[in-house]
Image (spheres, rainbow, N blue to C red):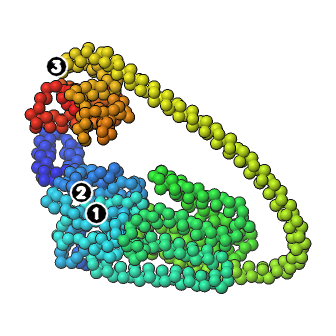
Amino acid sequence: MNHEKLPICIKEVYKNIFFILCGSKTLGCFGLLLFCLMSGIKQASGAEPVVIDNESGEYYLKGEYLDLYLDSNGTKLAKDFKNNQFASEFKAVKGELSNRDYPKGVYWVRFTVEQRSVEQQWLIELPDPHIDQAELYRYDSGTVKFIGRLGHGLPFSSRNYHHKNLVFALPLRAKTEYLLRLKSPLICSFMISVKSVEKFTSYALWEYYMLGLYYGILLIMMLYNLFLYFNLREKNYLFYVFYVISCALYTFREDGIGFQYLWPQSPVLNQWLNHYFELFLLLSFAFYSISFLELRKKARTIFLILLADIIVFALLLVLEYFQKEVHTPKQYFYVFPFILLYAASFYLYRQGNHYIRYYLIAYSFLLISVFIFQARMLGFIEHTFFTVYIFNFGFIIEIVLMSFALGEKIYISTKEKEQAQQTAYEALKEKEQAQATLVVQLKEKEELKDRINRELEKKVQERTIELIDKNSELQEKNQKLALMSAKLEEMNSSLDKNNWELNKEVKQKTIASIAGDEITMEDFLKIFPHETACLLYLCELKWKDGYRCQKCNNTKYNKGDTPLSRKCSKCNHRESPTAGTLFHGIKTDLNKAFYITYLAVVNPKKNTLEELSGNLKISMNTCWKIRKKVSDKKKEMEAKHLPMNKWENYLL
């Protein structure tokens, strides 16, 4: 909508209302028109501006402040939005802004910021660090001015503010309309906040302090349990350490700390982690849970189902890498193992395995954090420090409680081992006796296996020799068939050439006649019914004065490798009839290309590209390319003052 014409439109509306009121006998018509007028003015005004001052240092841009245009194809550029060309297509944002519905689209967000005081610097912050690319523009006198570009897919050094979130500095202007381009293949929250530098700095310091405390606790738990593993040689502790590492990497990826401090110049690693980290987290948690719960021994069916689910998830992950639409089933297979392990732990606890209680409590805290996270993403609860970092809190509680669970399990298993040692000692003598019998049986099995292997090797060698003989016979037959095919092709080419020579005089008269009057496509294709006829005609035009090599000017030649091609007898330079012509490298039928060239010279405006494409049954792009070549040839001939009235002059 053109806002400069809005006052004139309003005046015209008021004038029409006045005349209607004068000629109407009811007041209802006036009310209806007034409602339409107010609705039109409200629609034209768009979203409300965000008014910021020095008293409140933070503003969250919600639905009433934002207008959204979804570019599902991603073809729009910033310059396309100048002079508000797409103003009517922007829609009001409902609820929290995210790309959950269309993760492959490009989101253009329009909003207005009105600064009561231009003395204080304000910042625009995008709290979700996973946005692949964010570009900020401002409207200035009908044009769109670029401010900055940030994103998860760009090197971290490109950011003016070295912060894990995406931060833009707002220009010191009283009132400005902004355009924000957001694109991310991952499902992200597009929440936007405006903060003063003081508010941003104080919150960032507190945020980094809490994150440092979180990663410090993870590091201590990892080193402590690694020390226990080296002392006790209990594999549960090793799986626990791997799970702590995966939790740390997960939060490194989620909060952007890893990109800021560990791989700032490798944004491709962000994409790699986003694609494969789910598998790493699932494997580390599954291996730890399988070992801790002893699923192979106590719940083998659940173990097999879990293993099959992980294999299917890995296969879907590979398919998704090759651009297959498997995101929804992949997520189902990703969530199912966590639910299955929780149910299995509850089942085993009910069977009397009391050491699992800490595992159940820890897992429950993690599930609570997942529910809170999903409620925040769906907009049911507000964005606070607690809800944003709920996974960090959940991981800390889970990891600490699982450490207690490991300690209790080791204590219980130690007692069970002491009781089992006595029984094992009594069974040891029986095993020694059984081992002697087993050794004898193994020797007999080895002798039987060796005999069977020797027989199999002999049969394989005989079969291999037989296959080699068959392959040799097949190769000889294929060579003979290829030779016969080449001779047949040569005979067909010779036959076409003889037919051309027989009808040469008649066709030359017909070809000469089409230079003057236009003929139909059927008559043209009778003159040039196949590719050989076209090649023969090109040979006559190209070498009418005799053959001359393009490299050494030799006038003697031999037959080339392809039909009607010639090979220099001196330097072996090969030249086909189409070399150096308009039809060199063309992939469509040569007689159809001849006809398009003929029409482009004799009557270029007769047929459109759609008509040519339909009549000749070739693509419009091919028709356009041939016409373009003829047009370029015409310009070249015109520049050299060559005659342009004969279409055959364009062939060479």
- For the residues labelled 1 and 3, the Cα–Cα distance comes to 60 Å
Q: In this image, 210 relative to 357: left or right?
A: left
Residue 57 to residue 8: above or below: below
- Indicate the secondary structure of the residue bearing disc 1: strand
Residue beneath the point at 54% across and 64% down: 279
Of the two numbered discs 1 and 3 on the same chain, state the one appearing first in sequence. 1
x then y, percent, for residue 195: 29, 74
Q: Earlier in the sequence, mark 3 or mark 2?
A: 2
The answer to whether the residues at label 3 and label 2 have Cβ atoms under 8 Å apart is: no
> Which mark is in front, 3 or 2?
3
Identity of the residue drawn at 72% across and 48% down: 460
Q: Nearer the viewer, residue 79 or 173?
A: 79
Please tell me the numbered disc located at residue 78: 2
**In the depicted view, which residue is nearer to us: 222 or 600?**
600
- Pick whichever, 565 or 309, lies toward us: 565
Residue type beneath disc 2? Ala
Looking at numbered disc 3 in the image, what kind of residue is underneath it?
Gly
Which residue was labeled with disc 3? 516
Comparing labels 1 and 3, the label whose residue is closer to the camera: 3
Q: CA distance from mark 1 to mark 2?
A: 9 Å
Q: Position of residue 591 (x, y in %)?
A: 30, 26
Q: Earlier in the sequence, mark 1 or mark 2?
A: 2
SS class of the residue under badge 2? Answer: helix
Picture coordinates of residue 72 (x, y %)? 34, 51
Tell me, yes or no, whether the two marked residues, 1 and 2, touch with CB atoms within 8 Å.
yes
Residues at badges 1 and 3 in contact (C-beta under 8 Å)? no
Quarter of the image where the C terminus is located: top left
563 versus 322 height, above or below: above
- Residue linked to disc 1: 135
Q: As displayed, is residue 544 above or below residue 116?
A: above
